[in-house]
Image (cartoon, rainbow, N blue to C red):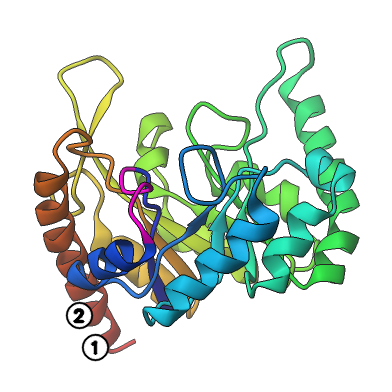
C-alpha cells in the first residue's frame, strides 16, 4: 500500500503555517489537507492569492500538500473554472467535493441519476486541469456507503473521479463489509476518512472516539485495503474533544500511532 497520512484540520484551521506544520510533525502525520472555506487561511474569495502562498509556506516547512477539502459541487465548478485551475496550478492533485443530498421533491433514484449526470459533465474539466474530484460517502446524505455510491462513478475515469470511504461516518447508517466494498470500487477508491465511533446510550447514535476505542475493526479495514493494494490519502478527522485542544492533540497522537501500528502489522502478514 502507498498511503499519504493526512489530517482534516477542522479544529486547528486558525494556526499559522509554521505552527500547523509543527503540529503535524508532533502527531506523526505526513501532511495536512488544504481546506478552502471560511474560517481558514484559504477561502473561495481569497484563493487566487492565499492558496499559492499557503502551499508555498507549508512546502518551506517540509510538508507537500496535494489533497484539498473544498466542498465544491459540480455545478459550481462548471460555472467558475478557477475553482479547479487555481489549486491545480499550485500542485493540488485531488479535492474532496461537496455532498449530494436527497431532494424529497424527487425520488432518491432521480437524485442519483442527476448526480451522475453532473459528474459526467465535470470530467472534461477535471481532465483539463489534471485534478481528481473525490466524493466522500457520508451518513444522512444521498450516498452513504460503497454500494450506493458505485453507480455515481462507474465507468468514469478513476484518474479524475474517486471515492473516499469513511468508516466513522458509515457507522451511523449500518455496517460495511470492507473487502468486497474495496474490490467493488477498485481504482476509484482514492481516500479513506479515518475516525471512529462508539455506540451511545442515545438511540441510533454514536459518540466520536479515537480509532481503537470505538466499534470499527481497523484490522479488517487494513486487510481489505491491502487486498486491493490501496494507494491514496488517509484523512484523519479528530472530532472528539473539540473544546480542549491539548486533550485532542494528545489523543490524536495516540490515535495516529495506533492506526500506523495496525497497518504495519497487516502489511507484515503473509497473503
Q: Residues within 10 Å of mark 2 (few under 14, many from 20)?
A: few
Q: Position of residue 232 (x, y in %)?
A: 50, 72
Question: In the image, is residue 105 above or below residue 249?
Answer: above
Q: Residue at x 43, y 81 (%)?
A: 60
Residue 265's disc is 2
Element at label 2: helix
Position of residue 30 measured from the top left corner of the image (x, y, whole percent): 35, 75
Residue at 56% from the left image edge and 67% from the top image edge: 53
Q: Is residue 1 left or right of residue 251?
A: right
Q: Are marks 1 and 2 in contact (CB under 8 Å)?
A: yes
170 magenta-colored: no
The image quadrant of residue 204 is top left
> Along the horizontal axis of the image, is 130 left or right of 136?
right
Q: Residue at x 40, y 53 (%)?
A: 8
Residue range (magenta):
11-16
Rendered-image quadrant of the C terminus? bottom left
Image mark for residue 203: none
Where does label 1 land, which residue? 268
Q: In front here: 14 or 245?
A: 14
Q: Position of residue 4 (x, y in %)?
A: 42, 75
Q: Is residue 241 above or below residue 157?
A: above
Residue 82 image-quadrant placement = bottom right
Going by the picture, which residue comes out furthest to the top? 105
262 left or right, relative to 187: left
Amino acid at each position: 500500500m502507498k498511503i499519504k497520512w493526512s489530517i482534516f484540520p477542522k479544529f486547528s484551521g486558525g494556526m499559522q503555517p509554521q505552527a500547523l506544520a509543527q503540529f503535524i510533525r508532533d502527531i506523526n502525520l505526513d501532511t495536512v489537507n488544504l481546506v478552502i472555506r471560511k474560517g481558514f487561511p484559504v477561502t473561495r474569495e481569497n484563493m487566487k492569492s492565499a492558496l499559492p502562498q499557503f502551499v508555498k509556506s507549508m512546502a518551506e516547512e517540509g510538508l507537500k500538500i496535494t489533497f484539498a477539502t473544498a466542498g465544491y459541487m459540480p455545478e459550481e465548478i462548471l460555472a467558475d473554472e478557477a475553482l479547479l485551475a487555481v489549486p491545480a496550478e499550485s500542485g493540488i492533485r485531488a479535492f474532496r467535493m461537496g455532498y449530494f443530498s436527497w431532494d424529497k421533491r424527487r425520488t432518491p433514484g432521480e437524485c442519483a441519476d442527476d448526480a451522475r449526470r453532473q459528474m459526467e459533465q465535470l470530467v472534461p474539466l477535471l481532465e483539463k486541469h489534471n485534478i481528481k474530484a473525490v466524493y466522500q460517502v457520508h451518513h444522512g446524505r444521498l450516498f452513504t456507503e460503497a454500494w450506493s455510491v458505485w453507480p455515481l462513478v462507474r465507468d468514469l475515469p478513476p484518474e479524475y473521479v474517486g471515492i473516499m470511504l469513511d468508516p466513522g461516518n458509515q457507522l451511523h447508517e449500518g455496517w460495511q463489509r470492507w473487502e468486497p466494498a474495496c474490490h467493488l470500487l477498485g481504482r476509484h477508491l482514492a481516500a479513506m476518512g479515518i475516525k471512529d465511533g462508539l455506540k451511545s446510550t442515545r438511540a441510533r447514535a454514536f459518540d466520536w472516539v479515537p480509532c481503537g476505542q470505538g466499534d470499527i475493526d481497523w484490522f479488517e479495514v487494513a486487510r481489505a485495503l491491502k487486498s486491493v493494494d490501496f494507494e491514496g490519502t488517509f484523512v484523519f478527522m479528530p472530532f472528539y474533544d473539540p473544546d480542549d485542544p491539548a486533550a485532542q492533540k494528545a489523543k490524536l497522537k495516540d490515535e495516529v500511532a495506533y492506526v500506523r501500528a495496525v497497518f504495519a502489522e497487516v502489511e507484515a502478514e503473509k497473503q
